[in-house]
Amino acid sequence: MIHNQNTTPLVDALKAYHEKNVIPFDVPGHKHGNGMEEFGQFIGKKVLQLDVNSMKCLDNISNPISVIKDAEQLMADAYYADHAFFIVNGTTSAVQAMIMSVCKPGEKIILPRNAHKSVTNGMILSGAVPIYIQPETNDQLGIAMGVSLESIEMAIAKNVDAKAILIIHPTYYGATSDLKEIVKLAHKHGMAVLVDEAHGAHFRFHEDLPSEAMEVGADMAAVSMHKTGGSLTQSSVLLLKEGLIDRNTVKTILNLTQTTSASYILMSSLDAARKMLATKGNEVISKILQIIRSARAEINQIPGLYAFSKELIGQPGVIGFDETKLGVCVGGLGITGFKVYDLLRDEYNIQVELGDAFNILAIVSVGDDEKSLKALVQALNDISVKYKGSHIAYTKIALENPEVIVSPRDAFYARKKIIKLEDSEGEISGESIMAYPPGIPIVTPGERISKEMIQYIKFLKSQHSMLTDTEDPYVEHIKVLGL
C-alpha cells in the first residue's frame, strides 16, 4: 500500500468529531471545556473541546486498528521503519519500552554512562544489568561526546552474552558516534541496537544532518518529536525495524506502562508534525541551517565565546555533528555557563536549553527564525562586553565510570538508610541524583559514591542547578544501601 504523506488521518478524524458537536456523557469530566471556563478562556476553548477520550471513530492507542494505526504507519514510512508507535508518556516511556523489549532480569545491556535517567529507570523496570562504557570527552569544552567503535568492541569481547547495545544519537550537544558501524558490529554478535534518538527527530529530513537510526539499520529508536520535530511536549515516537525484536512484544510492553487514556491533542500533533517534516522538512531545515550558520559565525566573532560545530568531526567520539545544536563555550568570559543561562533568562528574556560549567546550549529547530537568533546573538554580545575578564573559579572535576556494585533494580528494592551527602563517600547509592536538564545521572542506584561525585553535586548546588530524583528536595541527604 502506498501511503500519502500529505494526509493526516488522525487529525482529520479529530476534526470530524469536533464538527459533529457531540453531547458528551463520557470522560473527561470537563465536558468539552464547560466545566473549566476560566481555564478555557486562558488556553482557548477549542483546545478543551478537542480533549476527548478514546472512542470507535478515534481509535484506541492500546490496540490501534483504524485512524491511529494509519497515522502510525505514515510515521513509520516517513522514517524508513517497519512500525511506529505513538507515545504520550514522553520519550522516557519509549526508552523504557526499548530496554524491556530486549532485556529480561539479569541480562546485560552495553551503554554509555552519560545516558538519560530514562535508561536507568528502564533497567530498574526490566532488571537489566548495565555494562557501562566511557564516552569520549572534549577537554576544552568539558563535555561528553559519542562513544568510539573500539570501546564498543572491547565491551562486546568481555560481555558476549549481552543482549543489546544502547547508543545516544546525538548527544545533548549534537555529537554522533559511528552508528552504522556499531550496528554492523552488534548484529554480527546477535545483539540488538537500541537508539536514544531523543534529539534527532529532524535527522531524516535533510542531507546535511547525521543519518537517522532506522536508515543505518538500528533495531529500535526512541524519537522525541516534540524536541526538534514540532509536535507538542510529551509526544514521542518509538520506531521499530522488525527482525531481532517482534512488533507484538513491543506492543505488549508499551501497554504495561503507557496510559489507556491517551491525549488526542498530543497524538494529533504527532500526525501533523510528521506531515510537515515529510513534505516540507527539507525546505524548513535548509532555512534553519542557513540562519544558524550565520548566527554561529557572528558568535565566534564575540570575545570570549566559541560556538562549536562540524569542526569537531574527526575528534574522538565525533563521527558527525548536528548543526542545529547551538552549543556555545563561555569559558573565555571567565564566568560559568550556569551564570550565562541565568543572565539570558533574567535580563534578556531568552530561555536556552541548559547551562553547564563551561557552556550554554540553545536548541534551534523548526519553530525558530532569523529574529530569534539575532536576539540571542545580541544578548551574548552584550554579556561579553559586561563580563569579559571576570574570574569565577571552577576546578574541573572528572567523573569516571562508576563502580557498579549491584544492578539498578536490586538497589532500587534494597533496604536503605538516609545519611548526609557529605558522609556518603564509599557507600552504595540507593537513588539517582542528576541536574535537569540534561537529566543525565551523576550517580544511579547500585553505584558506589565517589568523592568526585560529591564534589560535583556540591558545585551544582552552588550554581543553583535544578537537582532532581532524590527524596530530599535540597539534596542535603542521600539514600544508601543498608541499615
Image (cartoon, helix red, strand yellow):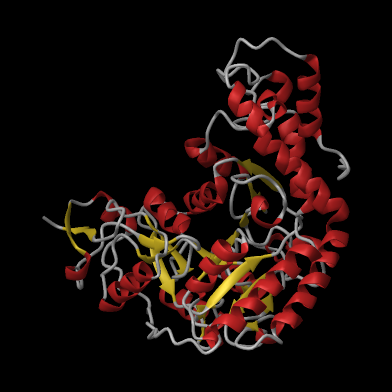
Residue positioned 70% across, 60% down in the render: 214
Q: Quadrant of the N terminus?
A: top right
Q: Is residue 293 above or below residue 438?
A: below
- Does residue 45 appear left or right of residue 187 in this picture? right
Q: Is residue 408 above or below residue 425?
A: above
- Does residue 31 appear left or right of residue 117 in this picture? right
Percent position of residue 161, x then y: 43, 66
Let me know if residue 8 appears in the view.
yes
Pick the front one: 304 or 129: 304
Quadrant of res 262: top right
Pick the front one: 181 or 255: 255
Q: Is residue 273 above or below residue 57?
A: below
Percent position of residue 289, x then y: 80, 70
Let me know if residue 322 appears in the view.
no
Quadrant of res 354: bottom right
Residue positioned 81% across, 70% down in the render: 291
Percent position of residue 293, x then y: 78, 76
Residue positioned 75% across, 41% down in the render: 271
